[in-house]
Amino acid sequence: MNSEPHNWIKSSYSNNGGDCIEWSPASATTTGIVPVRDSKRTDGPVLTVSVRAFAGLVALARSTEL
């Protein structure tokens, strides 16, 4: 992964009390890798997944009743 700064986007569900994630769509477009992090710990670890894996996570989150 490159060392350029990411343009982080918060989850559209971020108004649920702060338990949310951020991801970098620009990085996904240019590298095929989606960086994901906890929006409360912006200096914490970053999980990187393939675009396909990220799409699967989104589909799972949308289909699961929480």
Image: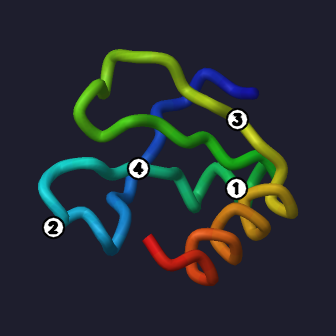
Residue visible at 27% across and 48% down in the picture:
19
Query: Can you give x and y, in whole percent of width and height, for residue 29 in the image?
Result: 72, 62
Observer-side mark, 1 or 2, equals 2
Kindly identify which residue carries mark 1. Answer: 28
Closer to the chain start, of discs 3 and 1, is 1
Query: Can you give x and y, in whole percent of width and height, for residue 12 in the image?
Result: 33, 74
Residue visible at 75% across and 27% down in the picture:
1
Q: How far is mark 4 from mark 2, CA to CA?
A: 13 Å
Query: Can you give x and y, in whole percent of width and height, for residue 6 in the image?
Result: 47, 40
Whether 18 is drawn above or below 55: the answer is above
Whether 13 is drawn above or below 57: the answer is below
Q: How far is mark 1 from mark 2, CA to CA?
A: 24 Å
Q: Amino acid at mark 2?
A: Asn
Kindly identify which residue carries mark 2. Answer: 15
Observer-side mark, 1 or 4, equals 4
Query: Can you give x and y, in whole percent of width and height, for residue 5 in the image?
Result: 46, 32
Kindly identify which residue carries mark 4. Answer: 22
